Amino acid sequence: EVQLVESGGGLVQPGGSLRLSCAASGFSFSNFWMHWVRQVPGKGLVWVSRISGDGISTSYADSVKGRFTISRDNARNTLYLQQNSLRAEDTAVYYCARGGSDWASDYWGQGTLVTVSS
Amino acid sequence: DIQLTQSPPSLSTSVGDRVTITCRTSQSVSSFLNWYQQKPGKAPKLLIYGASSLQTGVPSRFSGSGSGTDFTLTISSLQPEDFASYYCQQSYSIPYTFGQGTKLEIK
């Protein structure tokens, strides 16, 4: 069974940093692209970033480029999102998701809430 | 960035109704259009990928169609567990943008 479990969210002050983690199991992690998607509670979904299975290729939304870094440790079956220079508008639930056929996200974690506030 | 416009934003419907949700993209995405269902407090769930391919385990009352810039998600006979929000997403080009969502409510 495919499982994705996020952790690392919490309350952080503006300008602060967090590192989100996503532990994967039930599939061959290194064979799949992985994504981060965020959602302000009560609002819509916003794609944040993606990374290739080998970790070499990455992409970001303009809103986080230069502040967030996606990475992965295939030996630990874990995906990361390093978040620096956090802003109030980064407050959201962050989901990790597996890249499937036609680049759709076929499995999602339960999400972790990041709150940026003083 | 490719913009996605879903309609309607919300829909009041009844069990057994046939429901159609549309998604229009600001430029062609070929068939790289996906549909997700999300219930309150839960993660999104993939329903349809590649415009018309049914994800494994998704009931056959869900179907998708379209290509280019105009797409539809159809639920042939609405069930109680289908009352949720639905999002389209293009996976043709980065950033993989989403529509603003359609909320199905019980009439």
Image (cartoon, coloured by chain):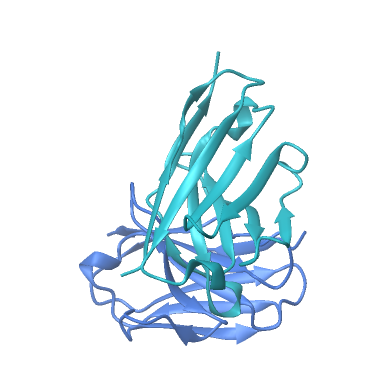
Chain colours: A cyan, B blue
Answer left or right for A12 relative to A109.
Answer: right
Q: Which residue lies furthest to the front in this view?
A: A75
Answer left or right for A112 relative to B84.
Answer: right
Position of residue A20 measured from the top left corner of the image (x, y, whole percent): 51, 40
Position of residue A24 measured from the top left corner of the image (x, y, whole percent): 42, 59
- Quadrant of the frame with the N terminus of chain A: bottom left
Up the image or down, A114 lies above or below A21; here it is above
Up the image or down, B54 lies above or below A54; here it is below
Answer left or right for A93 relative to A13.
Answer: left
Name the residue at 55% across, 68% down: A30
B70 vs A43, nearest the viewer: A43
A12 vs B36, nearest the viewer: A12
Name the residue at 44% across, 36% down: A113
Up the image or down, A14 lies above or below A55; here it is above
Q: Can I make out residue A45 in this image?
A: no
Q: Can I make out residue A22 in this image?
A: yes
Position of residue B107 measured from the top left corner of the image (x, y, whole percent): 27, 59
Position of residue A76 measured from the top left corner of the image (x, y, whole percent): 47, 55
